[in-house]
Image: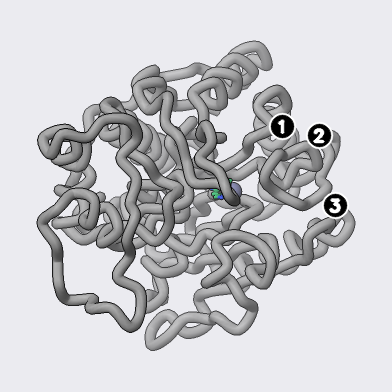
């Protein structure tokens, strides 16, 4: 299996985020991608290749074009207005404030284009975001050209990014863009399976009205877990998309036995959908040692996850999402991928 990696991810570094009662160093650190790369290399899973050059066309079809422009300009606007540090929003146009009053000030634009304080900008953020996106599209292209699977070490992650909002460490929705790329390349039906601890609210929003992309999520119950305001079991899609969204929320403390039963349900739904190709939003923050998440999967469980995905018998694009127990992240990713290759 080829792995796509760009060193440009490291330009997104040194940011802070809003925690509970504190502003703290970001959990989404460059060491994450580096340790994943090192473990993929040491495990000999296959060649590690750079992303190919990718235009923003797919990003502009998945996201609002003005949002993509904003991501590209945000740091420049922030410094032009005289600010430094991490560019973070401080006001959001939530109900009952006006949602039609697009501001000019960068402090307010950051809120216009986000849903939380979890997607800060520093000088290198946009370059890293572009590389993360290009890596996901490259992995999709590798699979479209006939490989059984490919893995994108996308950093920053993407699944919380909606059509016109950043949040939860995410800017461009890499997995959604990969799914769109596969559709554009001739796949009729694509399934996105999101196994990150957190509900992939952005991916759900993006494909909510579409019947050609099935989205399945296994995640912490939004009653108590981030992103709180999406991810309930009654969200099934609308219009053409009705029935093409599956949410499997699970309580904090869930272990592999229960989680694996949800994976089985998601896989059966994907089989029924008859997807031509699968995109896995591969978050490893289901791990028991994750510092911000509350499931109890162990390292030995991840190869079984990979083997079940292999049993779907479809070409598969793996896109890295979350996972913040940095020391264990590389081994856990390799666990999934080697389980897939052996499966
Ligand atoms: N300050 C992904 O896993 N809440 N995003 C963090 C600590 C945001 C997770 C709270 C979690 C976002 C891709
Ligand atoms: Zn997550």
Separation of marks 3 and 2 at Cα, in angstroms: 10 Å
Would residue 183 be seen by someone viewing this image from the given angle?
no
**Which residue is at the front of the view, 73 or 202?**
73
Under tag 2, what secondary structure?
helix
User: Residue 15: x, y in percent?
Assistant: 42, 31
Separation of marks 1 and 2 at Cα, in angstroms: 6 Å
**Which residue is at the front of the view, 132 or 178?**
132
User: Residue 161: x, y in percent?
Assistant: 39, 55
Sooner in the amino-acid sequence: mark 1 or mark 2: 2
Tag 2 residue: 299
Q: Looking at the picture, does residue 46 appear above or below residue 65?
A: above
Separation of marks 3 and 1 at Cα, in angstroms: 14 Å
Residue placed at 43% from the left, 36% from the top?
Answer: 156
Contact? badges 1 and 2 (CB < 8 Å): yes
Sooner in the amino-acid sequence: mark 3 or mark 2: 3
Residue placed at 10% from the left, 56% from the top?
Answer: 104
Query: Is 159 situated left or right of 298 in this image?
Result: left
Quarter of the image that includes the N terminus? top right
Sooner in the amino-acid sequence: mark 3 or mark 1: 3
Residue placed at 15% from the left, 34% from the top?
Answer: 82
Tag 1 residue: 332
Tag 3 residue: 256
Under tag 3, what secondary structure?
helix
Query: Is 117 situated left or right of 98 in this image?
Result: right
In the orientation shown, which residue stands out farthest toward the right? 257
């Amino acid at each position: 299996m080829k792995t796509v990696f760009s060193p440009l991810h490291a330009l997104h570094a040194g940011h802070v985020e809003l925690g509970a009662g504190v502003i703290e160093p970001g959990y989404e650190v460059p060491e994450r991608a580096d340790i994943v790369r090192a473990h993929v290399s040491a495990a000999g899973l296959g060649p590690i290749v750079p992303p190919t050059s990718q235009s923003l066309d797919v990003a502009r079809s998945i996201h609002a074009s003005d949002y993509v422009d904003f991501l590209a300009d945000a740091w420049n606007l922030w410094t032009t207005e005289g600010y430094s540090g991490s560019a973070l929003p401080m006001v959001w146009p939530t109900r009952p404030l006006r949602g039609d009053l697009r501001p000019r000030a960068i402090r307010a634009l950051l809120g216009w284009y986000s849903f939380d304080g979890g997607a800060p900008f520093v000088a290198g953020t946009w370059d890293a975001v572009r590389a993360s996106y290009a890596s996901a599209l490259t992995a999709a292209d590798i699979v479209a050209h006939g490989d059984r699977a490919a893995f994108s070490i996308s950093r920053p992650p993407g699944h919380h990014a909606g059509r016109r909002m950043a949040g939860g460490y995410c800017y461009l929705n890499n997995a959604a863009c990969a799914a769109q790329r596969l559709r554009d390349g001739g796949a009729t039906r694509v399934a996105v399976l999101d196994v990150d601890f957190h509900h992939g609210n952005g991916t759900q929003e993006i494909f909510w009205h579409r019947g050609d992309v099935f989205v399945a999520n296994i995640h912490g119950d939004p009653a108590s877990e981030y992103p709180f305001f999406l991810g309930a079991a009654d969200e099934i899609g609308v219009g053409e998309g009705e029935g093409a969204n599956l949410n499997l929320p699970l309580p904090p403390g869930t272990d592999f036995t229960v989680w694996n039963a949800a994976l089985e349900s998601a896989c059966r739904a994907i089989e029924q959908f008859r997807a031509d190709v699968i995109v896995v939003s591969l978050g490893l923050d289901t791990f028991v040692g994750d510092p911000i998440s509350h499931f109890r999967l162990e390292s030995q469980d991840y190869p079984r996850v990979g083997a079940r995905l292999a049993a779907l018998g479809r070409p598969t694009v793996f896109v890295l999402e979350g996972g913040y127990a940095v020391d264990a992240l590389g081994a856990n990713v390799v666990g999934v991928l080697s389980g897939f290759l052996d499966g």
